[in-house]
Image (cartoon, rainbow, N blue to C red):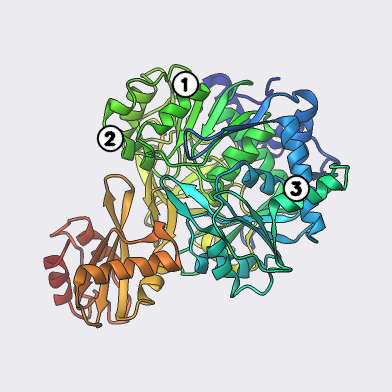
Amino acid sequence: MSYPYQIKSLEEYNSAYKKSVEDPEKFWADIAENFTWKNKWDKVLEWNFKEPKIKWFINGKLNITENCLDRWAESQPDTPAIIWEPNDPESHRRKFSYKELLLKVMQFANVLKNNNVKKGDRVCIYMPMVPELAIAVLACARIGAIHSVVFGGFSAQSIADRIQDAECSLVITADGAYRGNKTIPLKAIIDDALVRCDSVKKVIVLTRVRTPVSMIKGRDTWWEDEIQKVESEGNPYCAAEEMDAEDMLFILYTSGSTGKPKGVVHTCGGYMVYANYTFVNVFQYQPGDIFFCTADIGWITGHSYIVYGPLSAGATSLMFEGIPTWPDAGRFWDIVDKHKVNIIYTAPTAIRSLMAYGPDFIKDKNLGTLKVLGTVGEPINEEAWHWYHENIGKKKCPVVDTWWQTETGGIMISNLAGVTPQKPAHTTLPIPGIQPVLINEKGEIAEGNNTSGNLCIAFPWPGMLRTTYGDHERCRMNYFATYDNLYFTGDGCLRDENGFYRITGRVDDVLNVSGHRIGTAEVENAINMHTGVVESAVVGFPHAIKGLGIYAYVIFNGIHHDEDLTKQDISQTVARIIGAIAKPDKIQFVNGLPKTRSGKIMRRILRKIAEGETHNLGDTTALLDPAVVEEIQKGKL
């Protein structure tokens, strides 16, 4: 097996990039020819960024699971599709060949049908990182149901918000999840969420941790019992539903700058082509390689580079249930050694965390099978880049520093491993088909090299979002209204003397904490729900491990019996409403916030104080009460 569209040299990259800009429709049509289509497209692309309206492979018919499973079950049935490494290194690990995975997916697709799930229905999936999560995702896609995976760290309130927005009819969960030395009660959290969710008719529960759970008659049913019913019916076959290229494949919720999460919508045809193309090229995947993406399927990285990208390429994808520091900080490297991993793709947060534990956890591990190292989720600092390159790659493995977003569906700017140049802490060059532009402070395109600005994309690509679920205007306002005829990423960016790109971080009120986007408004709303809190303002500050930490300034008029305990109570409130990932790292009690006369909080000033800046706070004359700033500076943590 080979990939005719895999770029093998810098010359091939330059040629592919030139073609992709000069004739994008022919470029993407040639790549799309390599997939299984039930019906070819009539037209490659229709678009305008004003509405916005984007359609790829118009009237093309397909099912993504035939491309991820059926074709490989036929041509390479015994090739491992998924290798699963459990939380506990002493537990039984599992492996599924393409033939076995197809059977499991068809089986569970029939379970969904038995529970009245139809094409177009929304299904919420809230599960641990077990193979059944990937099986559930693919089973939804098999029958044309739209999956909405919610990360296992979110709270009942966050899940309820997402279920209500998507009007999900069925939830797939588990009794609980293992995460390091903790057990998370997933079913109990779902039960709390469903108090507010009338649309849900059925809940399917996988047994994972064997903890007692409540099972409501008529609503809740065990995964294992449902599988048994399908097995007793005899024929496990489930035909793949014919889907239009522009039919919805999944909704994935991401934090916005307002409190309400937004459901990013991806469709079947373009997303498949783009996830596959970026996977094969960025990582230079070769048949037989073991690809280990350490993300959770609850995030877009897991969707695109654990499930759809690798499986559509007939690759072997390694799924990991645990965390990088349990039972010790050598866990990733144990997995690389044990499974002879060739490519590892992880977050700068994880790298910085493991750096802090020192080299002892690496020295007795055989990392010789590694060929490519990847980073994702946030900009990587130079120190972490060098540590990764030297200690894990032994200076022999290219490091692909990938920039992309939930909304883009796949990697947008990155070096291609060993093919295009790498530069520490730089994402370097755009993927063929991606046309980045930088917009300066005057709102004009910043031409040439050695420049900076807000990163925008000038032309559509197949993997891009089509809308935000149930609210197209929000999609337009968020991504297409800031600059005329451009997709605005929300990120700042530098372009160096070689034309290499370096992402500098968010320019809006969204924080990138450990690679997870968290809206400041979302956290503020949660803090403000604590009894005694009058008002709050949240900003990011540099954090040695997470990249960015959450700093909360809180006006509190309750009674402080114990200030530390009050701070813990506020953190607990945030964890309860959003999830533990959004808990503030620092909470500073203040008497007032820097506001303009119109009542707008000047977060720019608060951000500088949190970063330790004492002098250059900018113009404070427009503030209602400039004295507040001095007081906040004195109390800085």
Tag 1 or tag 2, which sits nearer the N-term? 2
Q: Which corner quadrant holds the C terminus?
A: bottom left
Which residue matches tag 3? Answer: 108
Q: Closer to the camera, 561 or 423?
A: 561
Q: Give SS at disc 2.
A: loop
Specify whether 619 is left or right of 486.
left
Q: Residue at horizontal 68%, vertical 65%?
A: 168
Q: Which corner quadrant holds the N terminus?
A: top right
Specify whether 629 is left or right of 318.
left
* For the residues bearing labels 3 and 1, Cβ distance under 8 angstroms: no
Q: Residues within 10 Å of mark 1 (few under 14, many from 20)?
A: many
Q: Residues within 10 Å of mark 3 (few under 14, many from 20)?
A: many
Which residue matches tag 1? Answer: 370
Q: Quadrant of residue 434?
A: top right
| Residue type, label 1 | Leu
Q: Residues within 10 Å of mark 2 (few under 14, many from 20)?
A: some
Q: Which mark is residue 357?
A: 2
Q: Give SS at disc 1.
A: loop
